Structure formats: structure tokens, C-alpha cells
Image: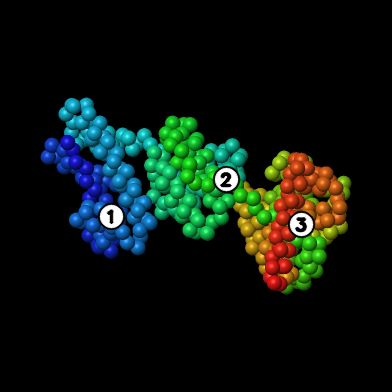
């Protein structure tokens, strides 16, 4: 029966990585099968014929898992030849091994393909989430790819632990898990993998997130800040207030507001999230912000997307990151303890409208919610957060 052993060939320069390969022996014929993996000489245990544990433990563990899986594949090929009770050669083993490898699609490769596929269908956000998940998973794997039949429950659990060790929230880890599971299930449908339910031991739910709102008094404090010599903060404040003035319009809808959406004293736009059309009366406070800035050379109303060259989505993403970062500084200057984001503008409009006894039906329609129950849940989440903050202040005085 043929034997399969993992071997290491050191580099002539011992400061560089050497190569791992398999030695296949059958009927006194010896052949080598290359792998794509390299380690340093001090990371190889000659006596045990295995990779040692050291400072690169996580990276080496991934390499070890990969080469052991490759070795098992070779051993299965040998076993299949043995079961036929017919003669076979080392060349037969290697040929079968290479054929099995060429037919496979790797996880990284498949995720990239699915991302491109979503982009072709104009599902840009989905394409981006696939790439985000791929980048996260690649970091966990230290760039070492794998096939779908290697993607077992242990690897998925290790990935979840890795993300938690990097201080990602449960919702964030669950987000990546759900995307990865979606891609895995599609690979199963296409016959690229067998369904083994590798996600059965990890969390894939959605925890409720706190919806934070600030008071009208705090909105005024933001509005009254002197930011004359701070143009970045002044711009950020304008975007936050403009969102609030337009009933808590989301930042993506602000970014894609077109000049032609403003007509006859009203803003009319389609919500990106729901596809619902909303109409808002144009007020002086809104005009004052728009008039502060030179006219946008593009079709868009606000200075968020300022060039139409195929990078519109990237410009929007860069601006939302920039604005949310600068809002933290504005919160400090205005002495607001609530962590400010653009979402706070939306939550605040709903909360303040409720405090002014605006009917739930009106708030729901104003925010573009599909039904009043969504608004009721939304407002309840804000109220719960305020009660928690009040309780915290009381306890601090004890």
C-alpha cells in the first residue's frame, strides 16, 4: 500500500521560508507533490514530521489544517485504488489528486464571484456586504483559502471566537455569519458542497439595538455652536441639522437628493430603504443650509456626492464615515453625552414629534414607515433607552 508523508524543504537562505510538500511512495517509486504552503525552518519538527507551535500559532494552525486535509485526500485516493484490487502506480495517485483539485472552486474565489454577480444585478449593497464578509473571513484565515468541504462547524466556531476576541458585537458577528451561511447555502444548491450545517453552533440572530435620541434643547445647542473656524465640523453640523429638518431623512437619501427633487416649494423623493415616495415642504432653515455652499456641479442637491464618475457610492460611504466621526467632536463641544451619529437625527425627530403630541399616524407617515406598528416599536425602543439613562443618573446620585 502506498504511503503519504508530509515533508519540508528548507530554503538555501535560512531567513526565508521553505516549502512543504508530500512524499508519495508506492512499489519503491518515490514522487513529490507540491503544496502552496511555506514555513520557516524553525517551525518544522524533523522528529515528528510536523509543524511546531510558536509565535505564529494561529497562522501555522491554519496551514496545518490545510495540509492535513490535503493529506487525507491523498490517503482516500490510495484507499480507493486499493479497494479496486487492481494494480496502480504513484503516477495514478498524483493524476487523480490533481484532477480532484482542478474541479473544485475555493471559498474565497466563490465569494468574489458572488459579489461580482450581485453587482451585475445592480444589487450594490449586497455586493459590498459579500466583500466585507470575504475580507473579514480572509483575515481570520490569514489569507489561506479553503474548499467548501473543509468548511466545518469547528472552523465556523473558531471564526466566531476570532471576531469576538477582536471586540466585534454580537450583531456584527451574526451579520458576517448570516452572509457566509447564505453564500454556503448557494454553493450547496449549485452542487459545490454537501449540506453539513456548519453554522449550527454559532449565533445568527439579531439583537435589538438601542435607539438613541436627543432633546430639542440639545438640538438647539448644536445649532448655536460657533464653528466659524472649524469648516469640517460646520459641514457635519449642517448635514445633521438638514437631516433633522427633513424629518430625520437617512444619510443615503440626503446624498442622492437631486436638484429636480426640489420643485414648487416641496422636496419629493423615494426612500432607498423602502421605495416609498415622501413629500416634505421646503422650509427657510433648509434653504439656508443649501445656500451656504457653492452649487453642486452634479445633479445632486447637497455637497455629498460632488462628481459623477462612477464613484458615487464610494463618495457616499466616505462621507458617512467622515460625518459620523466628526459628530463625536460636536457632541463634546455641545456637552451632549449621547453618542451622536446620523441615525440620532432620525430618532430625535420621532421622539420630539411624540413629545409634541403629534399623532402616531402622522409620525409614521412622516418617517416613511410601512405601518404604525413599526413606528410604535421604534418609539418604544427610544423611550426604553431614555428610561435606562434616567435610572443610571439616579443610581449615580446614591
Q: Is residue 76 above or below residue 315?
A: above
Left or right relative to 357: residue 81? left
Q: How many residues crowd around disc 1 within 10 Å: few (fewer than 14), some, or many (20 or more)?
A: many
Counting residues from the N terminus, which is met first, the one under dot 1 or under dot 2?
A: 1
What residue does disc 1 label?
51
Which disc number belongs to residue 348? 3
Percent coordinates x, y for residue 164 in the rendering: 50, 56
Which disc number belongs to residue 239? none
Q: Residue at x 35, y 58 (%)?
A: 57
Left or right relative to 208: residue 43? left
Counting residues from the N terminus, which is met first, the one under dot 1 or under dot 3?
A: 1
Q: Quadrant of residue 216?
A: bottom right
Give the alpha-carbon distance from disc 3 to disc 2, as whole Å. Answer: 27 Å
Percent coordinates x, y for residue 366 in the rendering: 81, 47
Which is more toward the observer, 141 or 205? 205
Q: How many residues crowd around disc 3 within 10 Å: few (fewer than 14), some, or many (20 or more)?
A: many
Mark 2 element type: loop
**Do the residues bearing badges 1 and 2 touch, measured as CB atoms within 8 Å?**
no
Counting residues from the N terminus, which is met first, the one under dot 3 or under dot 2?
A: 2
Which is more toward the observer, 42 or 169? 169
What residue does disc 2 label?
205
Q: Residue at x 50, y 43 (%)?
A: 180
Q: Is any part of residue 98 visible from this angle?
A: yes
Q: Quadrant of residue 44?
A: bottom left
Residue furthest toward the front? 398
Give the alpha-carbon distance from disc 1 to disc 2, as whole Å. Answer: 37 Å
Left or right relative to 306: residue 354? right
Q: Residue at x 32, y 61 (%)?
A: 54
Percent coordinates x, y for residue 101 in the rendering: 33, 38
Mark 3 element type: helix
Amino acid at each position: 500500500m502506498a504511503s503519504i508523508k508530509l515533508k519540508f524543504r528548507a530554503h538555501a537562505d535560512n531567513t526565508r521560508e521553505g516549502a512543504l510538500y508530500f512524499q508519495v511512495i508506492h512499489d519503491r517509486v518515490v514522487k513529490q507533490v507540491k503544496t502552496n504552503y511555506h514555513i520557516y525552518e524553525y517551525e518544522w519538527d524533523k522528529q515528528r514530521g510536523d509543524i511546531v507551535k510558536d509565535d505564529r500559532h494561529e497562522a501555522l494552525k491554519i496551514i496545518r489544517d490545510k495540509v492535513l486535509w490535503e493529506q487525507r485526500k491523498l490517503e482516500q485516493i490510495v484507499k480507493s485504488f486499493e479497494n479496486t484490487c487492481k494494480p496502480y502506480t504513484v503516477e495514478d495517485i498524483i493524476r487523480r489528486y490533481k484532477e480532484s483539485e482542478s474541479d473544485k472552486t475555493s471559498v474565497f474565489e466563490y465569494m468574489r464571484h458572488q459579489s461580482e454577480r450581485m453587482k451585475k444585478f445592480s444589487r450594490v449593497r449586497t455586493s459590498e456586504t459579500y466583500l466585507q464578509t470575504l475580507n473579514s473571513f480572509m483575515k481570520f484565515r490569514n489569507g489561506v483559502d479553503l474548499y467548501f468541504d473543509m468548511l466545518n462547524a469547528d472552523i465556523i466556531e473558531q471564526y466566531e471566537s476570532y471576531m469576538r476576541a477582536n471586540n466585534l458585537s454580537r450583531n456584527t458577528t451574526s451579520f458576517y455569519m448570516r452572509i457566509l451561511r447564505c453564500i454556503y447555502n448557494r454553493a450547496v444548491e449549485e452542487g459545490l458542497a454537501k449540506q453539513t450545517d456548519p453554522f449550527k453552533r454559532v449565533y445568527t440572530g439579531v439583537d435589538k439595538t438601542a435607539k438613541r435620541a436627543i432633546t430639542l434643547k440639545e438640538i438647539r445647542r448644536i445649532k448655536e455652536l460657533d464653528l466659524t473656524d472649524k469648516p469640517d465640523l460646520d459641514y457635519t453640523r449642517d448635514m445633521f441639522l438638514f437631516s433633522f429638518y427633513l424629518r430625520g431623512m437617512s444619510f443615503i437619501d440626503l446624498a442622492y437628493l437631486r436638484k429636480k427633487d426640489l420643485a414648487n416649494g416641496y422636496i419629493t423623493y423615494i426612500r432607498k430603504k423602502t421605495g416609498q415616495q415622501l413629500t416634505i415642504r421646503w422650509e427657510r432653515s433648509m434653504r439656508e443650509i443649501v445656500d451656504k455652499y457653492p452649487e453642486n456641479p452634479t445633479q445632486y442637491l447637497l455637497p455629498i456626492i460632488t462628481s459623477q464618475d462612477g464613484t458615487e457610492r464610494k463618495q457616499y460611504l466616505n462621507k458617512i464615515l467622515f460625518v459620523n466621526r466628526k459628530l463625536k467632536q460636536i457632541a463634546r463641544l455641545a456637552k451632549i453625552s449621547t453618542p451622536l451619529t446620523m441615525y440620532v437625527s432620525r430618532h430625535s425627530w420621532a421622539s420630539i414629534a411624540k413629545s409634541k403630541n403629534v399623532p402616531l399616524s402622522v409620525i409614521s407617515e412622516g418617517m416613511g414607515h410601512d405601518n404604525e406598528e413599526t413606528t410604535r416599536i421604534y418609539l418604544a425602543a427610544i423611550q426604553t433607552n431614555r428610561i435606562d439613562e434616567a435610572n443610571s443618573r439616579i443610581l449615580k446620585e446614591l
